Amino acid sequence: MSRLMTQPQIIHTISELRRRVASWRNGGARIGMVPTMGALHAGHLSLVEQVAAQADKVVISIFVNPTQFAPHEDFDSYPRTLEEDRAKLTTGKADLIFAPSVSEMYPNGHATTLTVGGPSEGLETDFRPHFFGGVATVVAKLLIAAMPDIAIFGEKDYQQLLVIRRMAQDLALPTEIAGAAIVREPDGLALSSRNAYLSTNERRVAGQLNVVLKDVIARLHGGMDISEAKITGKNALLNAGFDSVDYVAIRNAENLKPLGTLTGAARILAAAKIGKTRLIDNMPV
Ligand code: PAF
């Protein structure tokens, strides 16, 4: 199906989204969705490309979701750049931008929050206990509103991807949840909208996160045990200039259960802070 090489239209309401998607579906289109919080970078654009390769029509949502931020976090300062975001979507791969207001997504009297167990236990939840409830709730609302055949999420938020997959499975949503490989800068730093907060010196330190993870993976393959590898990784991040390390963890790649020894598919995941910026990254072991 051909797409016009123009910027996609922006709509703001769930009823309009439902109307547009219904008319595409009546025409036999397979629908793809890319949920985002905006401040689009090459990682998001690659999600759009990948889902467009598997769908006839693509809707990208741009919504800075208040329920996944704690009061002390960066909800107010999170970049909101809707017009710039729209200008980046010129390849014709995104057909529609859904950019609802907070009151559209959370009208007065909103009293429902989803709690997902399983993969949400530990890691991010130990440091951001509000996070996955907010993510699962907003993503469920977005998927129920658009009912896409496929929705795609970046592996940079690996735990989030598994939580969303579990939520969609448990609610029997008819949407395939696809994951996409992390897009990285030349020095290996995973692309993130929050990288924009980094000063020049912090940016240099940030580039060490992926280097340390690769080094820990090499040590694990060299026979280092998991508990020692976690400590080695944490110390290496502090030595590289990170101010604090929330975790360096080696987990089962499918369910994120802790591993005593390196068996089956494993994933290394880390979260660390430089100044006020918190960065996460992960890799297959
Ligand atoms: O990864 C994100 O950008 C957000 O957590 C998501 C999935 C769009 C939900 O707000």
Image: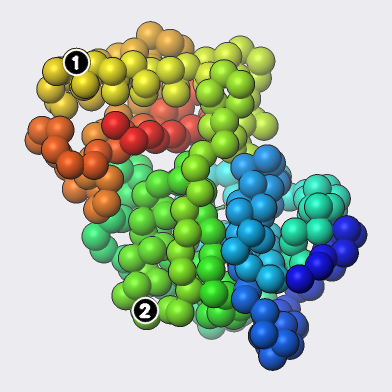
Ligand 1: which quarter? bottom right
Q: Which residue is mark 2?
A: 171
Q: Which mark is residue 281?
A: none
Q: Is residue 16 above or below residue 266?
A: below
> Hey, which residue is sitting farthest front in the picture?
1
Circle 2 crowding by C-alpha within 10 Å: few under 14, some 14–19, many from 20: few
The colouring scheme, among rainbow, by chain, secondary structure or one colour, is rainbow
Task: Name which residue lies at 44% across and 23% down.
Answer: 210
Q: Is mark 2 within 8 Å of ligand 1?
A: no
Position of residue 244 measured from the top left corner of the image (x, y, whole percent):
39, 23
Q: Which residue is mark 1?
A: 222
Q: Is residue 135 left or right of residue 26?
A: left
Eye-nearest disc, 2 or 1: 1
How far separated are the C-alphas under marks 2 and 1?
42 Å
Based on the displayed image, in which of its 4 quarters is residue 11 positioned? bottom right
- Indicate the secondary structure of the residue bearing disc 2: loop
> Hey, which residue is sitting farthest left in the picture?
260
Circle 1 crowding by C-alpha within 10 Å: few under 14, some 14–19, many from 20: few
- Indicate the secondary structure of the residue bearing disc 1: loop
Between discs 2 and 1, the one toward the N terminus: 2
Task: Give the residue type at disc 2.
Answer: Leu
> Hey, which residue is sitting farthest top in the picture?
239
Task: Give the residue type at disc 1.
Answer: Gly
Depth check: give the residue in front, 167 or 185: 185
Asked whether disc 2 touches disc 1, contact meaning CB atoms under 8 Å apart, the reply is no
One can see residue 113 in this view:
yes
Task: Name which residue lies at 68% across and 71% down.
Answer: 56
Position of residue 2 measured from the top left corner of the image (x, y, whole percent):
81, 67
Q: Is residue 31 above or below residue 185?
A: below
Q: Is residue 53 left or right of residue 272?
A: right
Q: Is residue 262 above or below residue 179?
A: above
Task: Name which residue lies at 68% across and 48% down.
Answer: 45
